[in-house]
């Protein structure tokens, strides 16, 4: 059997292996830190509630709108939605393989790139929770793929598909608007004598997915702007230079200490160096016309925009990791050739095998953290713990009860009604705004929560850790502590 035949057999094996790993993670992985937030938002839309108007929501509206009809049946819906996540993760792997194969013209490079993608702990862990990241990842790869087809064949159908997927990407996660000028400028540079036609086709193709967001912006611009932008910049109270610097340093350090990410970063740095050395991006315009240039620009722009928020989070790396692997795929043959020139064949095979084993073994921490919840603060996110809490909530009351839950995700599973203004965030988020503004933006604050507890409006109060000091007295007077699971407490109205 030739090496080419071996690589052909490896492609379906790697894709199947990736699908199996995603499915296992999705079946056993603990609830994501923000997963409950997005699950309950999607459920609220399914019940006819309007984003921004009826309840607070921090992203653009595409994800909860698309999946709302699948989010009305508690645990059954949970598995269905995670199934969509696994499908998106699998399709991302397929598209990445197709991109690298098309660009490198090397089945070997495409297979190695697929291996790097399929066994990435970061990719697997973020592609098995119902959060926006996996869908944004898939859409960004689809946009790049249709850009490649347009560059190659210059056919309007690829512009239409590019525009549709780019619009879906932006209306799914607003930060990706940073890619809009990049692709529009590139289309102009590639269109030559048909610049206006190409721009009009692209922009009109972006209309369908953009209509809901534009209408919402026109209807209630202040609330829409606060929810999707202003709130994001208030996630961290301490905005001192020292805190910003410390956050970035510690996050980057934790990221590069992960063996598989460190391997990717080293290979990517070597690949970019080789691309520049052989002058595949020898002129500025090549950044917008060549595949190497556009892959690099996608990487830099997505990475750059995710460095703007404070604090930055380690899992943001997942959003641009695919473009890092695509950049590696451009130069993989050259990297392996240079390695072969530096060491003997036997040592070369040993080095490659050791790196591959280290890469796969680096999955172990992700399994330990995400499936077994070895970190103490994560215990409450284990599916077994979530089931304990939500089962008890239903035992203690009815599905029609109004509940105050600090973790809104519990209400997705029980089907109970969230206390108004706590549909997504069930606790006071310290923002530099007045009580009236909290109410305007459909957010709860300490004043509102204290008032609701004092009036005994919610039938149950579900608290993570200790009761907040601002309504602790009202809680003890009107409610009885009836259940404890790990750090989660349930209080029932007396």
Image (tube, helix red, strand yellow):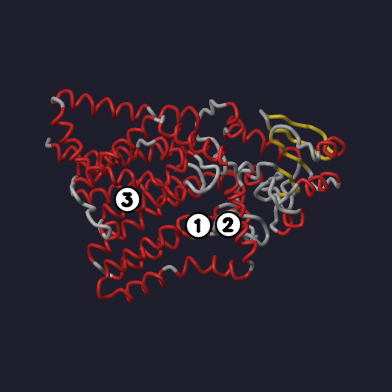
Say whether marks 2 and 3 touch (CB < 8 Å): no
Q: Which residue appears at 37% of the width and 74% of the height?
A: 200
User: Along the polypeptide, which appears first: circle 2 or circle 3?
Assistant: 2
| Residue at the far front in the pictured view | 241
- Which of labels 2 and 3 is toward the front? 3
User: Along the polypeptide, which appears first: circle 1 or circle 3?
Assistant: 1
Cα distance, mark 2 to mark 1?
8 Å
Cα distance, mark 2 to mark 3?
28 Å
Left or right placement of residue 490 versus residue 493 in this view:
left
The N terminus sits in image quarter:
top left
Say whether marks 2 and 1 touch (CB < 8 Å): yes
The residue pinned by badge 1 equals: 174
Q: Which residue appears at 49% of the width and 66% of the height?
A: 210
Left or right placement of residue 154 versus residue 33 in this view:
left
The residue pinned by badge 2 equals: 228
Mark 2: few, some, or many residues within 10 Å (few <14, many ≥20)? many
Mark 3: few, some, or many residues within 10 Å (few <14, many ≥20)? some
Q: As displayed, is residue 124 above or below residue 259? A: below
Front residue of 93/492: it is 93
- The secondary element bearing badge 1 is classed as helix
Q: Which residue appears at 34% of the width and 37% of the height?
A: 265
- The secondary element bearing badge 3 is classed as helix
The residue pinned by badge 3 equals: 296
Cα distance, mark 1 to mark 3?
21 Å
Q: Position of residue 67 (x, y in %)?
A: 53, 55
Say whether marks 1 and 3 touch (CB < 8 Å): no
User: Along the polypeptide, which appears first: circle 2 or circle 1?
Assistant: 1
The image quadrant of residue 287 is bottom left
């Amino acid at each position: 059997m030739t090496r080419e035949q071996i690589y052909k057999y490896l492609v379906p094996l790697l894709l199947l292996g990736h699908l199996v790993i995603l499915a296992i993670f999705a079946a056993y992985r603990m609830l994501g830190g923000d997963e409950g937030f997005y699950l309950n938002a999607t459920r609220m839309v399914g019940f006819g509630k309007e984003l921004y108007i009826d309840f607070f929501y921090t992203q653009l509206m595409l994800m909860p709108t698309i999946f709302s009809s699948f989010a009305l049946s508690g645990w059954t819906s949970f598995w269905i939605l995670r199934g969509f996540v696994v499908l998106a993760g699998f399709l991302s792997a397929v598209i990445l393989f197709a991109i690298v194969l098309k660009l490198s013209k090397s089945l070997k490079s495409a297979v190695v790139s697929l291996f790097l993608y399929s066994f990435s702990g970061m990719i697997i862990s973020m592609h098995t929770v119902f959060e926006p990241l996996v869908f944004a990842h898939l859409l960004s790869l689809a946009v790049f793929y249709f850009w490649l087809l347009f560059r190659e064949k210059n056919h309007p159908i690829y512009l239409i598909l590019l525009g549709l997927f780019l619009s879906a990407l932006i209306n799914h996660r607003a930060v990706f608007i940073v890619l809009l000028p990049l692709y529009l400028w590139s289309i102009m540079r590639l269109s030559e004598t048909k610049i206006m036609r190409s721009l009009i086709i692209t922009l009109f193709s972006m209309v369908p997915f953009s209509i809901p967001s534009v209408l919402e912006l026109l209807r209630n611009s202040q609330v829409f702007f606060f929810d999707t932008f202003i709130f994001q910049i208030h996630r961290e109270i301490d905005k001192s230079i020292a805190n910003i610097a410390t956050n970035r340093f510690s996050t980057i350090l934790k990221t590069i200490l992960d063996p598989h990410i460190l391997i990717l970063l080293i290979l990517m740095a070597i690949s970019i160096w080789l691309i520049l050395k052989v002058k595949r991006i020898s002129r500025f315009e090549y950044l917008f016309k060549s595949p190497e240039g556009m892959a690099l620009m996608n990487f830099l722009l997505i990475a750059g925009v995710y460095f703007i928020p404070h604090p930055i989070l380690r899992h943001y790396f997942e959003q641009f990791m695919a473009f890092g692997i695509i950049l590696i795929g451009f130069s993989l043959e050259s990297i392996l050739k240079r390695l072969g020139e530096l060491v003997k064949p036997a040592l070369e095979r040993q080095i490659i095998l050791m790196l591959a084993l280290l890469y796969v073994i680096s999955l172990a921490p992700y399994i330990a953290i995400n499936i077994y919840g070895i970190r103490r603060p994560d215990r409450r996110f284990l599916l077994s713990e979530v089931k304990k809490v939500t089962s008890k909530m239903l035992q203690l009351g009815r599905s029609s009860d109004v509940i105050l839950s600090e973790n809104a995700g519990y209400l997705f599973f029980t089907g109970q009604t969230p206390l108004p203004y706590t549909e997504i965030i069930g606790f006071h988020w310290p923002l530099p705004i007045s009580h009236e503004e909290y109410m305007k933006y459909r957010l709860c604050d300490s004043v509102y929560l204290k008032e609701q507890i004092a009036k005994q409006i919610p039938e149950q109060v579900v608290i993570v850790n200790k009761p907040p000091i601002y309504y602790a007295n009202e809680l003890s007077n009107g409610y009885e502590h009836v259940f404890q699971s790990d750090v989660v407490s349930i209080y029932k109205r007396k």
